[in-house]
Amino acid sequence: MEFTAQQIAQLLGGTIEGDEQVIVTKLCKIEEGEQGGIAFLSNPKYNHYLYQTQASIVIVNNSLELEQQPNTTLIRVENAYSCFARLLEVYNQYRLDRKGISSLAFVDKTATIKDENDVYLGEFVVISPNASIGKGTKLFPQVFIGDNVVIGDNVVLFAGVKIYHDCVIGNNCIIHAGAVIGADGFGFAPLADGSLKKIDQIGNVVIEDDVEIGANTTIDRSTLGSTKILHGAKIDNLCQIGHNCTIGTSTAMSAQVGVAGSCKIGSHCFVGGQAGFAGHLTVGNCSKIGAQSGVISDVEPNSTIVGAPSLDARKYMKSYFLFSKLPDINRKIAELERKIQELEAKK
């Protein structure tokens, strides 16, 4: 990436104060700025860094009043924070702008690639029989696509992602390195002799459009039918979604969450890190599940719950307050018991 201040100002609709032709090649924090870098300033708490930074360009708000002349080129915009976010988006698109099929990739002759001129298949990518790959999709090295898998348009699968047979990935999805989609659900039947017999998992996983899935997350295929991740859901790293689950539209799930089989998590929910869900539960829309919550019963829509086992957040805080008082309560009870014993001894 190499841009001048003038090019960036045109992109952001900003005005320049300083050298219009100064060149930047990277993005940086204002407090860690260096030559060739571009930073932004939107929080007044960081204003003093403007006069110390070595960044070549700093994006600032139109409303910023200078205390002295900084030793950097300024680009003034209406909202520095949102404009820097736009730059991050452009930078990421530039970084991921790859096309072509590596000579070390394997594509089965029965597989379909929608547009071979607008796709990227890295080294050691495997596309299995009857799989379908959409336009603009990027498969980084060592991605495995199983039999009959359907991958939509503009999908990015980072290195080492494994998509098992018969799964479906919608458009504009991002799946990060090491994620496994469609491994067998955890289904075993106890037998009379105490052993466990595997129950074959013949369903699949369906991931709808605009979903992002973090690194090393696993989503199990269903026993029958589909495990479903609905439109716009965001799942962080190291999560486990069990077989036959449904994760609702635009639900966000932090790292290390575990969802047991056949759970239905509603739309627009927020799930904190390391929360766990027992099997066959229903969580209503717009619910908030606190970090490390242990959810063992259904959750009503618009609820906020915390704790293990989980409780309504207000009830939990009242209970926690009482719990923190237990040492004092225990001491007072001991004193009362002693006084009662003294009174009984005087009878």
Image (cartoon, helix red, strand yellow):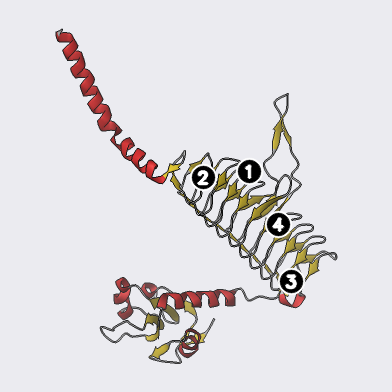
| Quarter of the rendering occupied by the N terminus | bottom right
Q: Amino acid at mark 2?
A: Val
- Please give left or right for residue 324 compared with residue 345 in the image: right
Q: Residue at x 44, y 79 (%)?
A: 37
Measured in 3D between alpha carbons, the distance from the residue under mark 4 to the one under mark 1, in whole angstroms, is 19 Å
Q: Earlier in the sequence, mark 1 or mark 3?
A: 3
Residue under label 3: 102
Give the SS element for disc 1. Answer: loop
Numbered mark located on residue 163 in the image? 4
Residue under label 2: 299
- Mark 3 or 4: in front is 4
Query: How far from the left and from the top, in percent, is residue 205?
Result: 69, 53
Measured in 3D between alpha carbons, the distance from the residue under mark 3 to the one under mark 2, in whole angstroms, is 49 Å
Query: How far from the left and from the top, in percent, is residue 288?
Result: 47, 51
Q: Earlier in the sequence, mark 3 or mark 2?
A: 3
Q: Is residue 232 above or below residue 331?
A: below
Give the SS element for disc 4. Answer: strand
Mark 2 crowd level (few <14, some 14–19, many ≥20, 10 Å Cα): many
Q: Amino acid at mark 4?
A: Ile
Residue under label 1: 261
Mark 4 crowd level (few <14, some 14–19, many ≥20, 10 Å Cα): many
Q: Amino acid at mark 1?
A: Gly
Q: Is residue 90 above or below residue 330?
A: below
| Quarter of the rendering occupied by the C terminus | top left
